[in-house]
Image (tube, rainbow, N blue to C red):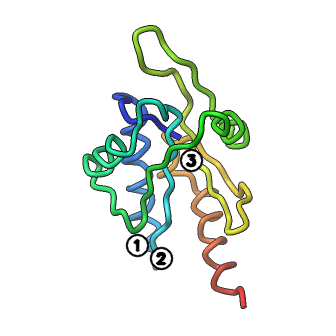
Amino acid sequence: MFYGTCQMVCPIEIEAIKTFEYKIHALGNPWIEVNLISFDSPHDQVDNLKQEAEHHHLDGTWYQLLRVKQGDLGYLAGVLGITWRALPGGGFEHNALVSLIDAQGRLVAQTPALELVHDVSFMQAVQAQFLSVRAAP
């Protein structure tokens, strides 16, 4: 999860995901579908999210920047282990986790965004998901 006006961790998180995706693709795997979900829906309107996607050169085929209803936000964040709090004057203090969700919507693996590129166990979990999808009838 992220928020569009973040100037610190979120841009690093997005670039780490892009780097990881290139790394996994270089191993012969297909591109990963990535959902970046905002926890600042009041400010991250559709036009703002489109600008963020363009700013980060995110291919809309594989990347979706999403908003959720405020009522669903706490539930989703709780399931994914995302914590945040609003700061005086704007912005948020928050953690940055990257989650691997399988085709059935189950949380398979998770890693801190700043460790993503070097997390061997997360890489193995992604590759195992590709193998299970290929083996499915």
Q: Nearer the viewer, residue 21 or 115?
A: 21
Amino acid type of the residue that numbered disc 2 sits on in the rendered structure: Pro
Amino acid type of the residue that numbered disc 1 sits on in the rendered structure: Ala
Q: Position of residue 28 (x, y in %)?
A: 46, 79
Q: Residue at x 72, y 91 (%)?
A: 137
Q: Residues within 10 Å of mark 2 (few under 14, many from 20)?
A: few
Residue 60 image-quadrant placement: bottom left
Q: Residue at x 36, y 30 (%)?
A: 5
The answer to whether marks 3 and 2 mark residues whose Cβ atoms lie closer than 8 Å is no
Q: Nearer the viewer, residue 33 or 134?
A: 33
Q: Residues within 10 Å of mark 3 (few under 14, many from 20)?
A: many
Q: Earlier in the sequence, mark 3 or mark 2?
A: 2
Q: Position of residue 45 (x, y in %)?
A: 40, 39
Q: Which residue is mark 1?
A: 26
Q: Which residue is mark 2?
A: 30
Position of 123 relative to 56 (above/below) = below
Position of 95 relative to 135 (above/below) = above
Residue found at the far top of this picture: 88
Position of 90 relative to 38 (above/below) = above
**Numbered disc 1: secondary structure:** helix
Q: Which residue is mark 3?
A: 98
Q: Nearer the viewer, residue 42 or 121?
A: 42
Q: Residue at x 33, y 40 (%)?
A: 48
Q: Position of residue 102 (x, y in %)?
A: 68, 65
**Numbered disc 2: secondary structure:** loop
Amino acid type of the residue that numbered disc 3 sits on in the rendered structure: Val
Q: Residues within 10 Å of mark 1 (few under 14, many from 20)?
A: few
Q: Position of residue 19 (x, y in %)?
A: 38, 56
Distance (Cα) linking label 3 and label 2:
18 Å
- Judged by depth in the image, the label closer to the viewer, 1 or 2, is 2
